[in-house]
Amino acid sequence: MQIHGKRIDFLVLWNVFKTLLVSLKITVSKKVVIKSTCLDPMCSTCGNPTAKIEIVGPNAYPQDALKWKTADYIHYDKFRNFNSNYLIYSGPGGNNGYIGDPIDLNRKAALIDAFTAPYNPIEMREQFYDMAGYCAACDAFYCSKHWSTTTSGYGKCPKGHGKSLDPHWSPDIE
């Protein structure tokens, strides 16, 4: 077969068609159940989220799933255990991707306790090394834009209080 003067292998064309058809079927028939708890703290300076803390329930998808491409659904379905709760985290010190990590009910309760006012810095530190952008000295959250962070992961809040936001940072590097 020739298209625009170029020879096209029918088998290659057929495989491309099948791939597109399967992707279309997945996209059209996908029932997306959004069932999650978002504990996203807001920056005290600008009001933007300091971190994304989302607990996705069993047999459910995170809120961002409504914006996903077909490949994202395929990966999520392949690697997620739908019998478990999952934590999706993205903060000043890192993230765990759009699939997240499985968590048990104790961790779920601890996350909710730590990131519901009144905030307890010790409980927050037990959950995330970067405390989701929280400065204990200020008793306030700051987003990545307002933490002056070095390439080594050490940061200072707008009032100059410093701490490591990266669990791999060492004072010997700074």
Image (tube, helix red, strand yellow):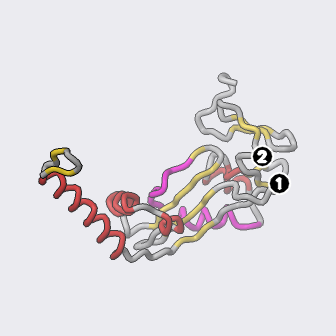
Q: Secondary structure at mark 1?
A: loop
* Residue wearing tag 1: 45
> Tag 1: residue type?
Thr
* Residue wearing tag 2: 146
Q: Is residue 25 left or right of residue 15?
A: right
Q: Residue furthest front?
A: 5
**Residue 111's quadrant in the figure?**
bottom right
Q: Is residue 9 left or right of residue 125?
A: left
Q: Residue furthest top?
A: 172
Residue 91, image x, y percentages: 63, 50
Q: Is residue 163 left or right of residue 93?
A: right
* First along the sequence among labels 1 and 2: 1
Report whether residue 114 is seen: yes
Position of the C terminus, as image quadrant, is top right
How dense is the environment of label 1, judged by Cα within 10 Å: few (below 14), some, or many (20 and up)?
few
**Residue 161's quadrant in the figure?**
top right
Does residue 72 sit above or below 159 in this rendering? Answer: below
Report whether residue 80 is seen: no
Residue 128, image x, y percentages: 62, 50
Q: Secondary structure at mark 2?
A: loop
Residue 27, image x, y percentages: 36, 70
Cβ atoms under marks 1 and 2 closer than 8 Å: yes
The range drawn in magenta is 95-117
